[in-house]
Every structure is written in structure tokens, then in C-alpha cells.
Image (tube, rainbow, N blue to C red):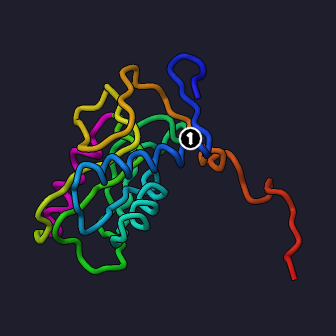
Amino acid sequence: MAGESGHRWVDWDEYHGLIERLARIVFESGYVFDHALCLARGGLRVGDVFSRLFRVPLSVLSTSSYREAAGTRRGELDIANSITSNAGPLSGRVLLIDDLVDSGVTLSRVPHHIQQQFPEITEIRSAVIWFKACSVIRPDYFVEYLPDSPWIHQPFEMYDEMTPDRLPSVQPTK
């Protein structure tokens, strides 16, 4: 959804459609990968869908750089020391999945980080929904190139400003 200059709002239907388009782009490229490695938090939902569609194990690596000013200002990149996986160590071909590439710092540093930990990796490719022009690196697969590098408001961000006490009250079903 278009909005004020420099911002883009995405609802749930559009978001899921973009994930499916990204999956189709990767599929049609012919790239076969052994592991889906998503970058948490933004890549979690995308990685989950890819793991299910491509029937590959899902691994998760936590990274963080947008912690300040309610997640709107970039700080130093933190990369977790370990990867959570349900299929043992990463090896073979890995698809690195995130929601977007903004500055490109994360996408340029993570492959080196994981190849040091997992020398059995033979190839790493990247897939994101949005590729911003301000990035220093181009992902292998993306759905939308954003020449004006807008701030993207994703549908799950509504929870960033919410606490459980603000959720509607419900009674358990019997």
C-alpha cells in the first residue's frame, strides 16, 4: 500500500502474497537448496513458509541492528553465536532468507559468519522480499526493488506497540 512519501504500508494479504511470489521466483530459478536459514526476526515468517513449501529444514539465526528508537534507528549489528536447527549442522547449499535488505550490512556479513562455523556449506544464496536501493549488496532473489528505499511498515509491527493486557479478553473454549 502506498502512503506518505518515504513510507510503505503492507497488510497481511499483500505480505503473504509477496512471500509466495518470492518462493515462486526461487523455484523458477531452479536453485535447489538443502537448508533454509532465516534471519530472525524479520525473516522468520518468510523462512517458515519456505521450509514448508520446499520441504527443507528450517534453521534460525538471530541478528539485530534495529533496536533503538522503537526499532526505527540502526545501531551496531549483533549476530548470535549459535544457530537453532532441527536438522543438525548446516551443510551443502543454504538459502539465507530475510524480509528485506536495507543497508546490506547484515546480508554481507552473515555468510562469512556462518561459513566460518560450518565449513561443510558449499554455497549460500540470499532471498528477500524487498531490496532497497540504499543497500551495499544485491540479494540473489528478491520480489521488489525499491529505488526510493522507503521505510516499510509490515503487518506484524502492530505488536511492537502492544502489550498482552491490550489484547481482547477471551474465555477458553470447552
Q: In which quarter of the image is the N terminus?
A: top right
Give the dominant element type of the magenta stretch: helix, strand or loop: helix
Position in image of residue 87 (x %, y %): 31, 79
The residue located at (32%, 63%) in the rendering is 36
Q: Name the residue under label 1.
A: 14
Q: Residue at x 34, y 72 (%)?
A: 57
Residue 140 is drawn in which quadrant? top left
The spot of residue 168 in percent (x, y) is 84, 57
Residue range (magenta): 103-118
Query: Is residue 108 placed above or below 134 in the rendered structure?
Result: below
* Residue drawn at (37%, 59%) of the image: 38
Q: Looking at the picture, which amino acid does disc 1 mark?
A: Glu
Residue 43 drawn above or below residue 68: below
> In x, y percent, where is residue 15?
54, 44
Q: Which image quadrant: the C terminus?
A: bottom right
Residue 73 shown left or right of residue 58 in the figure: right
Residue at x 56%, y 41% (from the top left corner): 14
